[in-house]
């Protein structure tokens, strides 16, 4: 589905739903959701379902619309019934407070980010078959032993079918939505010093605990079988369609390599843009992973955009002439496709 439809239509409908959920406390979560959901017949007369706006003639039918209904229903019900306390204040229907509660609860653990991810997965995606079961999830969240059991299961399957979850965690940690998330923390926590402490804790949670939020579209043999070929034992990397697991295995091999610093699995998400533009067209001779190719397309000028980022991924980025990591050569010759 084109992302424009997801954001322009789906985003409009769901933001309206969330606004009503946050501000109309007397309305039940199920009642609010049903007001934004309808059955209709398509052009062939087949019964379909879709989410809808109450104020405008905008509707959105997601790819798995009936499953999404159950996911959303479970999320809204749990946040409405699982009361959390942050800085002495009680909260319901607030996902930021829910996350802050988890950070406080597990502050002595070294895997806080994974625990937050596990709880968010329980909140939304851990259905009972294909049906929501909010009371069961609330029981798990309240019980230390049951939560730890689910955490073990989650860690074993963290790279399987959790693209939306890891996208969410990634966006809370970096980029445009990170600022929105941290501003939301300030709104929840009235104590400025404590809000700064929580924001600092969140910022410092290690990015290497986040899995690649990818799927089969990330998985190109041209890219997978050649990148890092000169520093990896490729025979130990599984030949599968599970790109998040492949990238996690690559990370586990490279994390102790002194020549490769600040690398974590989520960074591979650029393959959505990089592989179609570069690998599929076999443009090794102008690839930043080739030995000397960047020099042929890099024209360092501070008032211009970077041609390497534009060619490789279609990204508009200002030239970093003096502190350019590409010119430093950290990516040179790490792909077998460009090795001589």
Image (tube, helix red, strand yellow):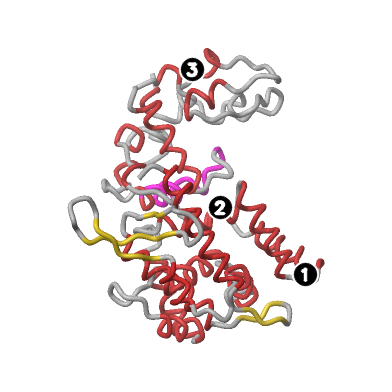
Q: Which mark is residue 293?
A: 3
At label 1, counting other C-alpha atoms closer than 10 Å, the crowd grade (few under 14, some 14-19, many 20 or more) is some
Q: Which residue is label 2 attached to?
A: 171
Q: Is residue 130 left or right of residue 165?
A: left
Which percent across, then down, holds residue 73? Answer: 42, 73
Magenta stretch: includes residue 248: yes
Q: Which residue is label 1 attached to?
A: 194
At label 2, counting other C-alpha atoms closer than 10 Å, the crowd grade (few under 14, some 14-19, many 20 or more) is some
> Going 62% across and 47% down the picture, which residue do you hit?
176
Front residue of 149 and 317: 317
Magenta stretch: includes residue 87: no
Location of the C terminus by quadrant is top left
At label 3, counting other C-alpha atoms closer than 10 Å, the crowd grade (few under 14, some 14-19, many 20 or more) is some
Name which of mark 1 and mark 3 comes first in the sequence: 1
Q: Quadrant of residue 188?
A: bottom right
Q: Label 1 vs label 2: CA separation?
A: 22 Å
> Going 56% across and 68% down the picture, which residue do you hit?
20
């Amino acid at each position: 589905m084109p992302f424009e439809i997801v954001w322009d239509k789906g985003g409009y409908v769901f933001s309206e739903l969330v606004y009503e959920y946050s501000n109309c406390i007397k309305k039940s979560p199920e009642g609010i959701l049903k007001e934004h959901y309808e059955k209709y017949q398509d052009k062939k007369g087949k019964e379909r379902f879709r989410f809808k706006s109450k104020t405008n003639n905008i509707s959105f039918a997601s790819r798995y619309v009936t499953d999404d209904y159950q996911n959303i229903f479970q999320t809204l019900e749990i946040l409405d019934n699982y009361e959390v306390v942050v800085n002495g204040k009680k909260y319901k229907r607030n996902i930021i407070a829910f996350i802050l509660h988890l950070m406080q609860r597990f502050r002595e653990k070294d895997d806080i980010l994974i625990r937050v991810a596990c709880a968010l997965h329980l909140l939304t995606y851990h259905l009972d078959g294909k049906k929501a079961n909010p009371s069961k999830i609330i029981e798990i969240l309240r019980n230390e032993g049951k939560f730890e059991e689910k955490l073990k299961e989650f860690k074993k399957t963290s790279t399987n079918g959790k693209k939306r979850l890891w996208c969410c965690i990634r966006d809370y940690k970096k980029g445009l939505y990170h600022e929105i998330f941290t501003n939301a923390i300030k709104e929840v926590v009235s104590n400025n010093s404590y809000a700064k402490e929580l924001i600092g804790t969140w910022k410092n949670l290690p990015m290497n605990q986040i899995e690649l939020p990818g799927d089969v579209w990330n998985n190109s043999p041209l890219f997978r079988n050649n990148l890092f070929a000169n520093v990896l034992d490729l025979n130990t990397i599984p030949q599968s369609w599970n790109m998040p697991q492949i990238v996690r295995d690559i990370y586990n091999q490279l994390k102790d390599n002194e020549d490769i610093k600040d690398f974590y699995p989520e960074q591979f998400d650029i393959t959505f843009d990089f592989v179609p533009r570069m690998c599929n067209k076999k443009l090794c001779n102008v690839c930043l992973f080739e030995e000397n190719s960047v020099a042929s397309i890099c024209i360092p000028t501070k008032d211009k955009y970077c041609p390497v980022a534009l060619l490789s991924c279609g990204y508009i980025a200002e030239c970093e002439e003096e502190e350019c990591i590409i010119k430093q050569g950290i990516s040179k010759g790490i792909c077998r496709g460009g090795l001589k």
